[in-house]
Image: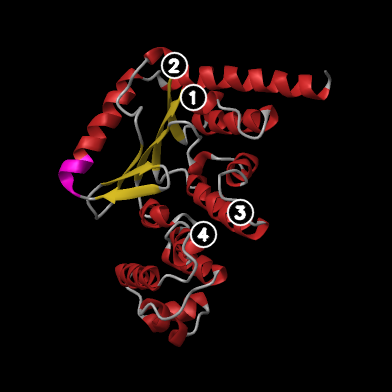
């Protein structure tokens, strides 16, 4: 894990702040007045010399109409908030207009409930202090807030049945986690496609990938393995990852059938939880 504040991320934060301010036609002075942030502080933020706090970020999002972008960007300024290999992908995730993710053995981070995320972060070969775990937990739950905006980003999810069947935190936690996914799917906030065990081998079985598209940037792919991950921006690699994702999608169940499967598995967990309570 990274330990110190990340100057490069602060610089990128400042560049994005300046770009968005200019896009809506505001001067630093005008933005200062509307956000009640001193012009000096704004200038330091845009130059990457000062770190904004949560209240700063929320005021910037409100005035600039950025839908929570600057608040979601905050965890990238602190390398300890996510694994080092995911920090760059997290930054991209906050800017994406379309996200396609694959859950191989775990529910993807942006879909995780608090209890599920806490169970995942409490595990692992290297023990984490309560402080470190809680910091990681806050970041993961903040990531999920991108789903609070109904319009953007558009999110597609492929879930391997292994991610649905692998019991994380016990049956009660799993029941809640899967019903959360069903609720997001039923509300049309996300599209879910389950890959049942019966599909056999599929194009994404050997790795985890996230695909992201943006308004004014080329698409990227984030590929992850054990303790490592990489953002790919080269067109050939991104196209290859997109092709693998599309092939796996072709082997998956429809959105409607996927929700039915996830709902059914959630009911199995509910019955198991009731049995634990009343054996």
- 17 or 111: nearer the eye? 111
Between discs 3 and 4, the one toward the N terminus: 4
Q: Which mark is nearer the camera, 3 or 4? A: 3
Q: Residue at x 49, y 84 (%)?
A: 38
| Relative to 239, residue 197 above or below | above
Q: CA distance from mark 2 to mark 3?
A: 33 Å
Between discs 1 and 2, the one toward the N terminus: 1
Q: Of the numbered discs in the image, which one, if any, rests on residue 128? A: 3
Q: CA distance from mark 1 to mark 2?
A: 8 Å
> Toward which corner of the image does residue 139 lie, by quadrant?
bottom right
| Relative to 264, residue 112 above or below | below
Between discs 2 and 3, the one toward the N terminus: 3
Q: Of the numbered discs in the image, which one, if any, rests on residue 103? A: none
| Helix, strand or loop at mark 1 | helix
What residue did someone put label 2 on?
197
Marks 3 and 4 in Cβ contact (< 8 Å): no
The residue at the far right in this view is: 278
Q: Of the numbered discs in the image, which one, if any, rests on residue 162? A: 1
Q: Of the numbered discs in the image, which one, if any, rests on residue 81? A: 4
- 166 or 55: nearer the eye? 166
Between discs 2 and 4, the one toward the N terminus: 4
- 47 or 127: nearer the eye? 127
């Amino acid at each position: 894990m990274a330990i110190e504040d990340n100057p490069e991320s602060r610089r990128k934060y400042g560049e994005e702040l300046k770009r968005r301010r200019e896009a809506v036609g505001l001067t630093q002075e005008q933005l200062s007045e509307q956000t009640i942030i001193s012009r000096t502080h704004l200038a330091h933020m845009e130059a990457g010399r000062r770190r904004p706090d949560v209240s700063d970020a929320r005021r910037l999002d409100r005035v600039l109409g950025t839908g929570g972008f600057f608040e979601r960007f905050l965890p990238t300024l602190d390398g300890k908030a996510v694994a080092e290999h995911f920090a760059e992908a997290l930054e991209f995730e906050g800017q994406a207009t379309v996200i396609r993710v694959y859950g191989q053995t775990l529910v993807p981070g942006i879909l995780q409930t608090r209890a599920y995320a806490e169970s995942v972060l409490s595990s692992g070969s290297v023990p984490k202090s309560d402080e470190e775990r809680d910091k990681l937990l806050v970041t993961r739950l903040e990531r999920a807030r991108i789903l609070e905006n109904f319009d953007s980003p558009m999110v597609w999810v492929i879930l391997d049945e292994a991610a649905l069947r692998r019991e994380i935190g016990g049956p009660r936690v799993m029941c809640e986690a899967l019903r959360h996914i069903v609720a997001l799917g039923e509300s049309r906030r996300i599209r879910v496609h389950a890959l049942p065990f019966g599909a056999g081998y599929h194009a994404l079985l050997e790795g985890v990938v996230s695909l992201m598209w943006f308004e004014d940037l080329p698409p990227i792919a984030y590929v992850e393995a054990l303790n490592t991950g990489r953002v790919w921006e080269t067109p050939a690699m991104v196209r290859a990852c997109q092709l693998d994702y599309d092939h796996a999608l072709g082997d998956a169940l429809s959105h409607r059938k996927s929700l039915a499967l996830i709902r059914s598995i959630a009911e199995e967990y509910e019955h198991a939880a009731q049995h634990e309570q009343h054996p």
